[in-house]
Image (cartoon, helix red, strand yellow):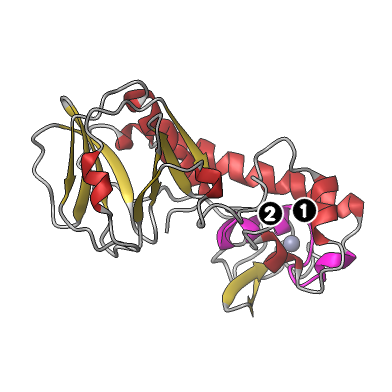
Amino acid sequence: MPELPEVEVTLRGIAPQLTGRLITGVAVREPRLRWRVEEAVGCLAGREIRALRRRGKYILLDCGDGHLILHLGMSGSLRILKRGTPPQKHDHFDLQFGELILRLRDPRRFGAVLWTEQPPETHPLLRHLGIEPLARAFDGRRLHALTRGLRSAIKQALMDGSRVVGVGNIYANESLFMAGIHPATRAGRLSLARCIELAAATKKVLREAIRAGGSSLRDFVGSDGKQGYFQQRYLVYGRAGDPCRRCGTPIQRLVQGQRATFYCPSCQR
Ligand SMILES: [Zn+2]
C-alpha cells in the first residue's frame, strides 16, 4: 500500500514533468473508484497545471480555478507515459498533456480522482487532516501538545491522521523503535523529552524512506509501471522472532487497534 513516502516520491517524480503543462485530454476508462469519478473531470482539457503538492497521501494538481485531487488508495500508482501507450487492464484514468500521459493504475480501485473548485484544504476528505510530520511545525513540543490527556497508546496516537497525517503502520513501528519507546505507552504520559525524540525519529524514518524511494524515481517516468513500491530494510517491521538489529533480543509482535505492532522488548520501554 502506498504510504506517505511513496506518495511523496510519486509527487517528486511527476511534478517536474507536469508543472506548467496544458491538459489536452482526459480518459476515464473506469469511473468506479473509491468514489465515482465525476463528469466534471472529463472537462479539464484546456487547463494548465500550475503546481502540484501533497497533503497527507493526497496529490493536489492546482489548475487555477480548481484542484484535481488524486489518491492512490490501496494499490494505485501514477506513471508518466508517451501518448499512445496502450492501457492495461487496471489503467483506469489518464490525463493527457500533448505527447505525455499521466496514467493511474489501480487494481483494487480504492484510489480517488476528484475535482474541487473550493480550496482543497476545505474538502471533506482533507479538512480534518492533522499536521504534516515533515513540516517544520511538527516537533516534540507539538507532539507533546497533541497527546496531552490521551489515554490511547502512543502508536495509535501517532497513526491518528487527525493529529499527525500520513504516519502509517510501518513508519509508526519504525519511529517508535528508533526513539526507544514502547508502542503501548500511554500517549498522554509521554514526557516532552520523549516526544522530542519521537518527533525527530518520525521525520528521520520518513526522510530515509523518501530517499530510498528516490532511486526508483525514474520508474515514475516512462516505464511500463510494472515496478512495485520500493522495499526498505526495516528495523522492526515484519521481523517478529528475528534478532533486534541493535541488541539481538528477538523482536516481538502484538496487535493494537487491529494493526500489527513490532518492537524490541529490551530497546523499547
Ligand atoms: Zn533491541
Q: Of helix, strand and loop, which one carries label 2? A: helix
Residue 79, horizontal then vertical, whole percent: 28, 40
Residue 40, horizontal then vertical, whole percent: 27, 47
The image quadrant of residue 19 is: top left
For marks 1 and 2, give the CA distance: 6 Å
Labels 1 and 2 touching (C-beta < 8 A)? yes
What residue appears at the point 79 percent right and 56 percent down from the top-left corner? 146
Tag 1 residue: 179
Q: Residues within 10 Å of mark 2 (few under 14, many from 20)?
A: many
Tag 2 residue: 175
What residue appears at the point 50 percent right and 51 percent down from the top-left corner? 123
- Judge by depth and name the residue closer to the eye, 46 or 54: 46
Q: Of helix, strand and loop, which one carries label 1? A: helix
Does residue 215 appear in the picture of this structure?
A: no
Q: Quadrant of ligand 1?
A: bottom right
Q: Is residue 182 magenta?
A: yes
Q: Is residue 174 above or below residue 95?
A: below
- Judge by depth and name the residue closer to the eye, 125 or 259: 125
The amino acid on which the numbered mark 2 sits, given as a three-letter code, is: Ser
Q: Is residue 77 magenta?
A: no
Mark 1 vs ligand 1: CB below 8 Å:
no
- Judge by depth and name the residue closer to the eye, 22 or 198: 22
The amino acid on which the numbered mark 1 sits, given as a three-letter code, is: Ala
What residue appears at the point 47 percent right and 43 percent down from the top-left corner? 118
Q: Which residues are the magenta region?
A: 167-189
- Judge by depth and name the residue closer to the eye, 86 or 112: 112
Does residue 168 appear in the picture of this structure?
A: yes
The image quadrant of residue 172 is: bottom right
Relative horizontal placement of residue 139, taking residue 78 as reference (left or right): right
Residue 201, horizontal then vertical, whole percent: 72, 47
What residue appears at the point 75 percent right and 38 percent down from the top-left corner? 137
**Quadrant where the N terminus is found in the figure:** bottom left
